[in-house]
Amino acid sequence: MKICIVGTGYVGLVSGVCYSEVGHYVTCVDKDMKKVDQLKQGRSPIYEPGIEELLVSNQQKGRLHFTDDLAEAMREAELIVIAVGTPANKDGSANLSFIEAVAKEIGTHLTSYKVIVTKSTVPVGTGQKIKSWIQDYCGKMAFDVASNPEFLREGSAIYDTMNMERAVLGVESKRAEDLLVELHRPFDTKIVITDLATSEMSKYASNAFLATKISFINEVANVCEQLDADVTKVAEVMGLDPRIGSAFLGAGIGYGGSCFPKDTQAFIQMGERAGYSLKIVPAVEKVNFEQRERLVQKVERAFGGAGLKGKQIAVLGLAFKPNTDDMRAAPARDIIPMLMTAGANVVAYDPIAMKEAASYLPHVTFSESWREAVCGADAVMFITDWKEFKDLNLKELKQELASPIVIDGRNLFEPQVMKDLGFYYDSIGRMKIELEGESYEGTSNRGSRLHRQKLS
Ligand SMILES: NC(=O)c1ccc[n+]([C@@H]2O[C@H](COP(=O)([O-])OP(=O)(O)OC[C@H]3O[C@@H](n4cnc5c(N)ncnc54)[C@H](O)[C@@H]3O)[C@@H](O)[C@H]2O)c1
Ligand SMILES: O=c1ccn([C@@H]2O[C@H](COP(=O)(O)OP(=O)(O)O[C@H]3O[C@H](CO)[C@@H](O)[C@H](O)[C@H]3O)[C@@H](O)[C@H]2O)c(=O)[nH]1
């Protein structure tokens, strides 16, 4: 099948390489010429495991092309996929200006029947808007619109697409349905065929539900902390019930990323505009933000009444999750400014996301390695659950720190192990390890060593 994909962000690019990998012929269009040039040279603008291999091999096979010329890209295509961004407006609603511009451009260049399918996350009713935007520009040319929301996760996007659990096809004609079923045939996945509105809604409902699971387990964690229960065990027990399921019960610092924060907000706005005020989703958002604040309170508590002024805090992990350099709505972007407002000096390290992070966090010092970041620090905070951090040598970590204070926002380590190694260790919804009779005032000079003070 010949396909034109508009937008080479995560969704457009990953779809492009995966569709071509299963044998379709794909031309990806982006208005960003720099991205197009980079992609033509086989270099991916996004960090995503496995993407460059597929990018290069499918270009070599002649099944994958890149251009900034939409008219040329769509001329031969049977299917046009819209995969441009839908960022949040100030009020949280989805900004459809990129979608509108693309739809009008498609209308201008439509010279034969095509199916135009939206993969971007769009509020219910957008498919109908796209239809009328195209109609305004295409004269009497026949076309169909369809909805096929994307469910990939960053960091495992190639795997998720090649092994998709389901494809939702929101269609208005048998012709569009047949073409989209054909598109998905090589993926051997479960296909749900429905109307445009239901398909569009299924994306927001899925993301809001996953976000709800995360905020729910975070609230359970917060109560666990008060009552000496262990949230990881509670989650394990809950997850063994197939009606609940074990996924997305990882307590931590709340969700971030380019999707959950903006899609929950857009869902709330969509409800308002439809005349129904959602009650659960706003609470999910509130819990999510408070979870960041709670982490900062944990490090403040570690220093007793001393406050964070002049403290050297090492922050390990900046990306919103491992295996990505995406900093969109990353928790680190909330937590680090809170630390700095409280007077701390922050030294940060992330295996991949530091270049991306630098533009969002201009006053942070970045380190070349976790060792360099923690050297002489008064405390270390774990923000992203990179494998590199989970595997780090804890004895070395203790040696490098000025005071052995670990605040773990991702439950990377076992409290008992941390206790045996002599750390002050506070994580999420689990036993807190305090060092009896000692308080840590920390040091103010980077590079200075252990400065512990016995409580009198
Ligand atoms: N990122 C994800 O993991 C993910 C997963 C599922 C769904 N989604 C949804 O998919 C959509 C795209 O997300 P993304 O993260 O890939 O976006 P992105 O912002 O990373 O990329 C969008 C791309 O579209 C290009 N573009 C914008 N207008 C254009 C035009 N008129 N012509 C050609 N190119 C144009 C931009 O230059 C950019 O490269 C959003 O609605 C998002 O909510 C994202
Ligand atoms: O148990 C968990 C699981 C995730 N998270 C956090 O939740 C956020 C989102 O994680 P994840 O869902 O893995 O990443 P995304 O790439 O944002 O993917 C989500 O958003 C995409 C865009 O809509 C959807 O396509 C995916 O199905 C959906 O999982 C991250 O900050 C995670 O750290 C937790 O705190 N606890």
Image: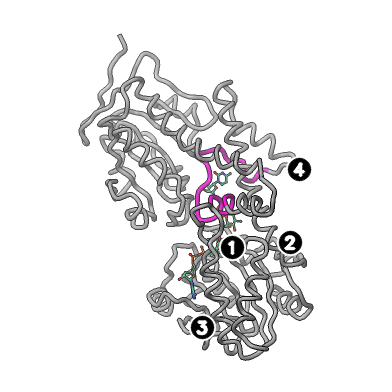
Is residue 307 in the magenta section?
A: no
* Residue 362 placement (x, y as % from top left): 29, 50
Disc 1 or 3, which lies upstream in sequence? 3
Is residue 250 in the magenta section?
A: yes
The residue that disc 1 covers is 159
Range covered by the magenta-colored residues: 246-265
- Quadrant of the rendered image containing residue 26: bottom right
Report the magenta stretch's main SS.
loop
Foreground mark, 4 or 1?
4
- The amino acid type, in three-letter code, at marker 2 is Thr
Disc 1 or 2, which lies upstream in sequence? 1
Residue at position x 36%, y 35% in the image: 380
Disc 3 or 4, which lies upstream in sequence? 3
Distance between the Cα atoms at labels 3 and 4? 46 Å
Q: What element carries label 3?
A: helix
- The amino acid type, in three-letter code, at marker 3 is Leu
Foreground mark, 3 or 4?
3
Q: Do the residues labelled 2 and 4 touch (CB within 8 Å)?
A: no
Q: How crowded is mark 4: few (under 14 residues within 10 Å), some or many (20 or more)?
A: few
The residue that disc 3 covers is 70
Q: Are marks 3 and 4 in contact (CB under 8 Å)?
A: no
- Which disc number belongs to residue 243? 4
Residue that sits furthest to the right in the current view: 174
- Quadrant of the rendered image containing residue 99: bottom right
* Residue 272 placement (x, y as % from top left): 64, 50
Does the numbered disc 3 mark a residue whose Cβ is under 8 Å from ligand 1? yes
Foreground mark, 1 or 3?
3
- The amino acid type, in three-letter code, at marker 4 is Arg
- Quadrant of the rendered image containing residue 312: top left
Residue at position x 30%, y 42% in the image: 347
